[in-house]
Amino acid sequence: MTEINATRRIYGLDTLRASAILLVMMSHYGVVVSGKLTFGFLTSIGWMGVDLFFVLSGYLIGNQIMSTLARGNRFSLKTFFARRLLRTLPAYYVVLAIYFMFPSALGGSNTPSIWRFLTFTQNIGLHFGETFSHSWSLCIEEQFYLILPVVALLIASFRKPVFWGWSAIAGVIIAGMAVRGMAWMNHGQNLINPADHAVYVYYSSFARFDELLPGVAIAMLRNFHGDLYSQIIRKGNLLLVCGAASFILTAYLFLNYREIDDYGFTFSMMTFGYPLLAASFALLTMSALSPNSLLNRLRVPGAEKIALWSYAIYLVHKAIFKLSLAPLSGWNIDADGPVGVAIVMGISIFGGWLLYRLVETPFMQLRAKLFPSVHFERDAVSGRAGSMQSPA
């Protein structure tokens, strides 16, 4: 049996990951294609799909590391990094090459140097509208993959490693809030402009790292506090209700109080809004993991496939959106109408599937051959434990 077929997929995680990529696509559709709120309020909150990806990735990667350490097994950094690179780099570099081969069609307001894309540092100083700007979230995840296992191994060498692990999680979350609050104070306070917001908050690694930590916290609970985790996870539908209610409330606050006309971005939402959003998604993730939850048991048609292709869809969808503008105009198809939406969204999903089949799959097979590991939860459990998705 191959690694890809070794474990049953968790339907709830598929549903969450599919929801995340669809939210991101709806957000970008309004920005790139239609210039309107084509999907209503979902267009306005679509950027939150990235935050959901962050929490899912934090859990999946965190669980790979924590489960190995909790069993007392040797954790191999070489194997971990090799598996991560084979998982994320091939498809990313293919899409990156396309962006650089067709700069006139796909270029943005500015294009960072190629070495920054190759090293996943293009999010530093990034502004809205630049070339391949949605790769900012991949930067944060790749940086996270580099730091988390090293820090986890270091903490594992301490006395009372579980205590220090929880302290580190709490410290990073508090630090994230502090970074965003200081950005508000240092760059115009309530008058912080969108450009500064992009550089110092939205795309900043220091201002967004904390959103991966609720997912890591779930992995800590599962592997080092098994009895407590079991008690919590048994209340799957309560977790679902609380997570959904928390998300609805947080989304409402973001829509109405993140940026106020004639005032600007607000300190409260900039500082505390992102961890509240991540906490909401953490509750939904725990519900998805609960066998007692409707979210865990319900198999949404198509969600498994969309989840499986989500990384590839995330990489290619914005380029396809841009390339669709001329044909839609030439064929007199309304980009804001149902036909235009169906065509563009359908081609984008097909493009993601094609990238998944032609690039991701062969390298996943190579990874399974070169670096097999029974200690890592397979990425296929939720489509992928690794990159995503985002606005801008």
Image (cartoon, rainbow, N blue to C red):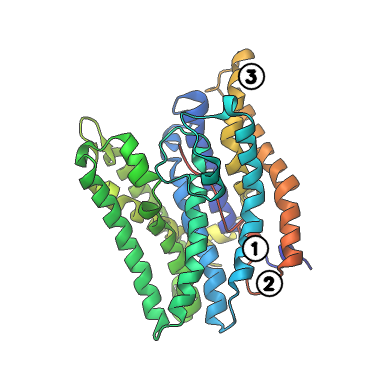
For image coordinates 37% across by 48% down, the residue present is 248
Most extreme residue toward the right, as rendered? 1
Q: CA distance from mark 2 to mark 3?
A: 46 Å
Residue 245 visible in rendering: no
* Residue 335, picture quadrant: top right
Name the residue at 69% across, 37% down.
350
Q: Secondary structure at mark 2?
A: loop
In the picture, measured across the screen, residue 144 lies left or right of residue 378, that is left
Mark 2 or 3, closer to the camera? 2
Nearest-to-viewer mark from 1 and 3: 1
Distance CA(mark 2)–CA(mark 1): 9 Å
Q: Are marks 2 and 3 in contact (CB under 8 Å)?
A: no
Callout in the foreground (2, 1): 1
Asked if marks 2 and 1 touch (Cβ < 8 Å), the reply is: yes
Q: Which residue is mark 3?
A: 327
Provide the residue designation for mark 1: 83
Q: Earlier in the sequence, mark 2 or mark 1?
A: 1
Q: Position of residue 145 (x, y in %)?
A: 52, 61
Residue at screen point 45% across, 82% down: 157
Front-lying residue, 110 or 278: 110
* Residue 373 badge: 2
Q: CA distance from mark 1 to mark 3?
A: 39 Å
Task: Residue at 44%, 42% (x, y): give it.
Answer: 47
Query: Quarter of the image holding residue 316?
Result: top right
Mark sitting earlier along the chain (1/3): 1
**Along the line of sight, which residue is nearer the eye, 185 or 43?**
185
Quick check: 313 left or right of 26? right
Looking at the picture, how far across and down is residue 8, in whole percent? 67, 65
Amino acid tagged 2: Ser
